[in-house]
Amino acid sequence: MEQDYSSHYNENDFWAKVKKHAKKAGAKVLQPAFELYYAFKAEETPTWAKGVAIAALGYFILPIDAVPDFIPGAGLLDDVATMAVAITSIGRYVTNDIRKKAEESARKFLG
């Protein structure tokens, strides 16, 4: 049975996770997280696609998941995989503008 992780998402927890793990996570984690975040925020993204994005982000910020985030080198791999599947699913709504904005945000957090 699939679990809906969308209930685990909230704006404050998203930003707290990004701030806490930015340096450790790197661009490979931050880029897809921001792509999903900005796709979710985009008015033109349909409701079903926003649901996919928010579920993946809910999984990303959930402190206890399949591979706990504190495990060095592996802790965020399941988050990246989940976000990659979500981005593939809603790819047509992750526009070039969203990708650019996500890249800029990732760079900002990585310094």
Image (spheres, rainbow, N blue to C red):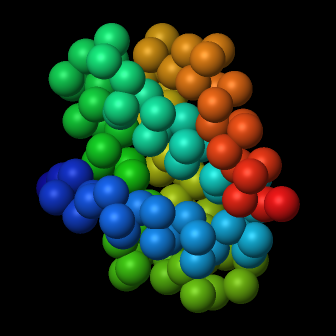
What residue is at 64 percent from the left and 15 percent from the top?
Answer: 96
Residue nearer the viewer, 106 or 59:
106
Position of residue 88 relative to residue 83, above or below, is above
Position of residue 67 relative to residue 101, above or below, is below
Q: Tell me the quarter of the image containing the N terminus.
A: bottom left
User: Relative to 12, is 5 on the left or the right?
Assistant: left
Q: Position of residue 102 (x, y in %)?
A: 63, 37
Q: Is residue 85 visible?
A: no
Residue nearer the viewer, 10 or 2:
10
Q: Where is residue 31 in the image (x, y as percent from the top left)?
A: 66, 44
Position of residue 87 relative to residue 77, above or below, is above
User: Relative to 49, is 14 on the left or the right?
Assistant: right
Q: Where is residue 8 in the image (x, y as percent from the top left)?
A: 23, 64
What residue is at 58 percent from the left and 77 percent from the top?
Answer: 20
Position of residue 35 relative to residue 3, above or below, is above
Residue 40, by quadrant, is top left
Q: Tell me the quarter of the image containing the C terminus.
A: bottom right
Residue nearer the viewer, 20 or 2:
20
